[in-house]
Image: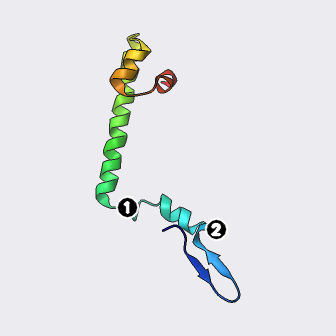
Amino acid sequence: MVDHLIISDELYRSLTDSGVFENLQESKRWILPYLLEKQARKEGKAEGSREKAKALKREAVDTVIIAKTSGLSIEEIGKL
């Protein structure tokens, strides 16, 4: 849904303009459980990649090698 307008002779109300639509988009209540699980797995995998990259960085492994093995960008590795 892009927006929902309620229009009458006297006024109109837009769910986007009033912030209702944004709240619905941010809410996880209406997301299907399997999509939430998929998102959680993806976030967990990314966190694991960051932890591995941190460990390799502590061992003074070259940043290019860390980027190739972790899938992280050189900029992301620099921020770790």
Give the residue furthest to the front: 2
Res. 3 image quadrant: bottom right
Give the residue furthest to the bottom: 9
Determine the residue positioned at 39% across, 65% down: 30
Determine the residue positioned at 34% across, 54% down: 36
Q: What x and y, as percent, mark residue 18?
A: 63, 69
Amino acid type at circle 2 is: Asp
Most foreground residue, 64 or 80? 64
Q: What x and y, as percent, mark residue 28?
A: 42, 59
Mark 2 or 1, nearer chain start: 2
Q: Image height check: is 31 above or below 42?
A: below
Residue ID for mark 1: 31
Q: What x and y, as percent, mark residue 24?
A: 49, 65
Residue ID for mark 2: 17
Q: Is residue 52 visible?
A: no
Q: Is residue 60 visible?
A: yes
Label 2's element? helix
Determine the residue positioned at 43% across, 16% down: 63
Amino acid type at circle 1 is: Ile
